[in-house]
Amino acid sequence: MRDNIKKLVSAFSSAFDVPQPVVEIGSYQVPGQEGYADLRPFFGSKQFIGCDMRPGTGVDRIEDVHRLSFQDGEVGTVLSADTLEHVENPFQALAEMHRVLRPGGLLLITSVMDFPIHDYPSDYWRFTPEAFRLLMRPFASCVVGFEGNPEKPHTVVGLAAKGEMPRKALQDFARLTGFITYIPKTGQTP
C-alpha cells in the first residue's frame, strides 16, 4: 500500500455516499504492511468484505476476481487498490466487478504505471490512463486520472459508477485529490 493510495481512498470515502457492502479486491496485507494497508477504517461502520486469492491478514473471503462468487447486483462498492497489475485477465476482472455491482454502485480502481516489478504473487501489467478508460467502458460513467509525470505517471486511477455519478461528489473528490489530473469520459466533468 502506498501513501497516495490511502489518501485517494480517504477522499473517495469522504466525497461519496459509498453504498455497502464495500468489497475490496486484493485485500491481502503483504508482510510488513499488516495494519498499514487496511482500508476498512476509511469506511466506518459500513459492511466491508476483504477479498483476495489467498488467505491472510485483511482477507475475509477467498475470491477469484475472474469468477466472483457474489450474486449479480449484490455489491454496493468495489475497491481494487494496486491490484489489477497482478490479475491475469483485467478485462474479465472488470466485467465481474461490473456484474456484481448494483445499479448506482461505485468502483474505485488504482494501479501502477511507472513502478518496479513486484510479485504478489505475479506482476503482469502496467496501465495507461487510456487503458483504464477501456477497461471501464461497460460503466455508465467514469473518470480516469493519473498522478505524476503526464508522459509516464506512477499511478493511474479510475472511478466509475453503474449509473450516473453524482456531480457534487465528483467535484468534491476532485478537490480532495488535487494531486491527481483527471481525464473525464464524455459528459463527466469533475
Image: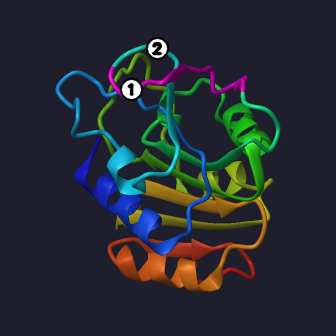
The image position of residue 38, as x and y in percent, is: 31, 40
| Sequence-earlier tag: 1 or 2 | 1
Q: Which mark is residue 28?
A: 1
Range drawn in magenta: 57-69
Task: Say whether marks 1 and 2 touch (CB < 8 Å).
Answer: yes
* Residue type marked 2: Arg
Q: Is residue 55 left or right of residue 129?
A: left
Residue at x-position 75% and y-position 73%: 164
Q: Amino acid at mark 1?
A: Tyr
Could you say which is closer to the camera, residue 59 or residue 142? 59
Q: Residue at x 39, y 54 (%)?
A: 44
In this view of the protein, which residue sits in the foreground, 3 or 62? 62
Residue 54 is tagged as 2
Mainly helix, strand or loop, the magenta region? loop
Residue 12 to residue 26: above or below: below
x and y percentages locating residue 166 in the rendered image: 65, 78
Q: Quadrant of residue 167?
A: bottom right
Q: Is residue 59 magenta?
A: yes
Say whether residue 178 is left or right of residue 140. left
Q: Nearer the viewer, residue 117 or 179?
A: 179
